[in-house]
Every structure is written in C-alpha cells, then in structure tokens.
Amino acid sequence: MSETELANPATVASAQIAEHLTFLAYEVSQNGEAWFAQHSTQPNLRLRALGGGTLIASFFGLKGDPATAIRFANELNQKAVVARFLIDPDGDFAMEGWIAAPYDRAAFSAWMDTWQRDFGAVVNHPDAQNLLR
C-alpha cells in the first residue's frame, strides 16, 4: 500500500477487516484496491474502501424468472439487519453490507455474526434453490 492509501482510514480499516477474516478461516488476497476472501462454507466476499468505511459484497449467479428474483431480494431486504440485497447491472444477485471506519474488532465481530445471520435467510428462503446458482 502507498503512503496515501495508508493515510486513508477506510483503506486501513479494509485491510484490518481482511486480516480479521483470516482469523475466521477465510483465504484472503488483494487485487488493486479490492480484497477478496474465500471460505469453504460461507459466501465469497469482496471488500473495498468506500464512503469512509468498507463495502463488503457477495455475488451469486441467478437462474429463473427475473420478477421472482426481484421479489426474492425484496423479501430478504425486509428482514435483513446489516445486508442489502439487489440484482446488479450484470444480472447477478448481490448481498452487500457497509461498516464504518475505523475498524474495531468487537464491532466487526458482531457485524459479521449478523451478516452470517442475514446470509442464513438467503439459503433458507424457499426460492433460493430455484433462483441461485
């Protein structure tokens, strides 16, 4: 990271979150300004500094009817705590969440527990198997 990037609190927080994810058994790599985290049982994550914090996102391919996918995302948004669900411009189903900088270990741990709870609502939704690849 350059000195300019290190001076940016959101960039520092993103790097600290990436490091925290290694503790949670994610394999983490960096490509340019983004971090990528892979896990054997959790969705893959993309992290990037944005708006004074870190935007964390997971993407899933969609199959089936677009109207059903939009209804699926809307239903999940009504129950989500830290995540928002959307159909992105590429036609993928996305789960996104934002956490403010600076990084705090306890706050991120609580955020991540809630993120995983929000993800549980995705996989337990009756339409998930028919919509997500």
Image (spheres, rainbow, N blue to C red):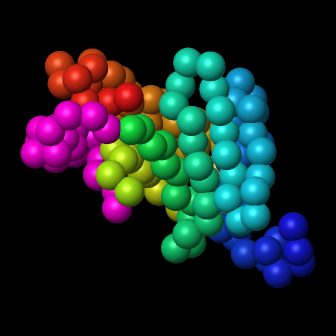
**Identity of the residue furthest to the bottom in this view:** 4
> In screen coordinates, is 124 left or right of 56?
left
Q: Residue at x 36, y 47 (%)?
A: 92
60 lies left or right of 123: right
Q: Is residue 13 above or below residue 38?
A: below
Residue 127 lies, in percent from the top left, at 18, 24
Which residue is rendered at x = 32% and y = 22% of the image? 123
Residue 32, x across and y down, in percent: 76, 64
Quarter of the C terminus within the rendering? top left
Q: Is residue 72 magenta?
A: yes
Q: Residue at x 57, y 42 (%)?
A: 45
Residue 117 position in % (x across, y down):
38, 28
Instruction: Give the position of the N terminus as an image quadrant.
Output: bottom right
- Tell whether position 73 is magenta: yes
Of residues 70 and 74, the one drawn nearer to the viewer in this rendering: 70
The residue lying at 25 percent from left, 30 percent from top is: 131
Quadrant in the picture for residue 27: top right
Q: Which residues are magenta?
A: 62-89
The answer to whether residue 116 is seen in the rendering is: yes
The answer to whether residue 91 is above or below residue 1 is above
Comparing 23 with 35, the one in front is 35
Q: x and y percent of residue 19 in the render? A: 77, 42
- Horizontal arrangement in the rendering, residue 122 relative to residue 59 (left or right): left
State how many labels appear.
Answer: 0
> In the image, is 87 to the left or to the right of 65?
right
Q: Which residue is at the front of the view, 131 or 24?
A: 131
Tell me if I can see residue 110 in this picture.
no
